[in-house]
Image (cartoon, rainbow, N blue to C red):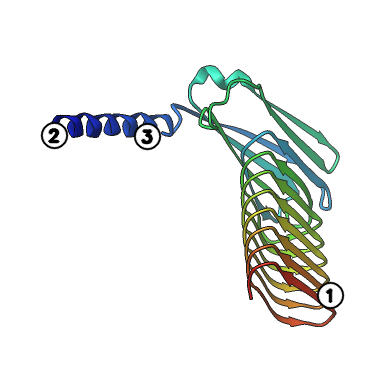
Amino acid sequence: MKSSKAVLTGSLALFLILLTSMCSVADYEDTVKKSFNVSKGGLLTIETDRGSIEISTHDKAVVDVELVRKLASESLVDNVITNFEHEGANVTIETKVKKGLIHFGRDIKLKYLVTVPKAYNLDLSTAGGSISVDDLNGNVDVKTSGGSLAFGNITGPVNGKTSGGSIKLEECKGTVMVNTSGGSISIGQVEGDVEAKTSGGSIKIDKAAGSVTAKTSGGSIKIEEVMGDIQASTSGGS
């Protein structure tokens, strides 16, 4: 019996070692850097097969891009195809990863670190990864198939959607429409209408100058102050 336990323990330990090795940090890492001279009020478009996106701002009329690529091996570099387009005030970034080369998402990991002018517009989409946006004056439209969304102080409308992850918005001077298929929603002060929907999680709204629609399929709803109409419903929660 002791021998069988020893074999079982040894097999489990070997499995854990192999699993850790499979999920370890990539062997190859590099950073692609680009800078584009733009004017305020332009549009940044990012469409990527995978990767997180972090947007920060500065006072310069420049879009600075850092694309950090972590790969299982250097041989995979040619399988990550990124195109950069710059036309006037607008910048477009598109990344495609060749199919059949990804195993449980560990072979190729991407992170976009982008700095834009404080007055700029965003259209961001990733098939897997979180998205965060610093204080910004402009339209914000973001979508991820899996990851959290975080927004600072936004002057302009916010439209955010995730298929799985939490959503947090500090402040917005404009309308807010956010939707998650699984996660909580936390919204600070909004000078406009708010629509917040989640398929599983709580909803908290501090203050809204307009009307509020809040719906969750499983979680509580807490609203501090609203100047307009309220429509709130939950299938499971207070």
Disc 2 from disc 3: Cα separation:
27 Å
Q: Is residue 35 left or right of residue 52?
A: right
Residue in the picture at 83% in, 72% down:
192
Disc 1 from disc 3: Cα separation:
49 Å
- Residue located beneath label 1 in the image: 211
Who comes first in sequence, dot 1 or dot 2? 2
- Residue located beneath label 3 in the image: 20
Whether tag 1 and tag 2 are in contact, CB under 8 A, the answer is no
Where 205 sits versus 86, above or below? Answer: below
Among the 4 quarters of the image, the one containing residue 204: bottom right
Among the 4 quarters of the image, the one containing residue 203: bottom right
Give the secondary structure at mark 2: helix
- Residue located beneath label 2 in the image: 2
Q: How many marks?
A: 3
**In the foreground, 27 or 105:** 105
Point out the residue furthest to the left here. 2
Who comes first in sequence, dot 1 or dot 3? 3
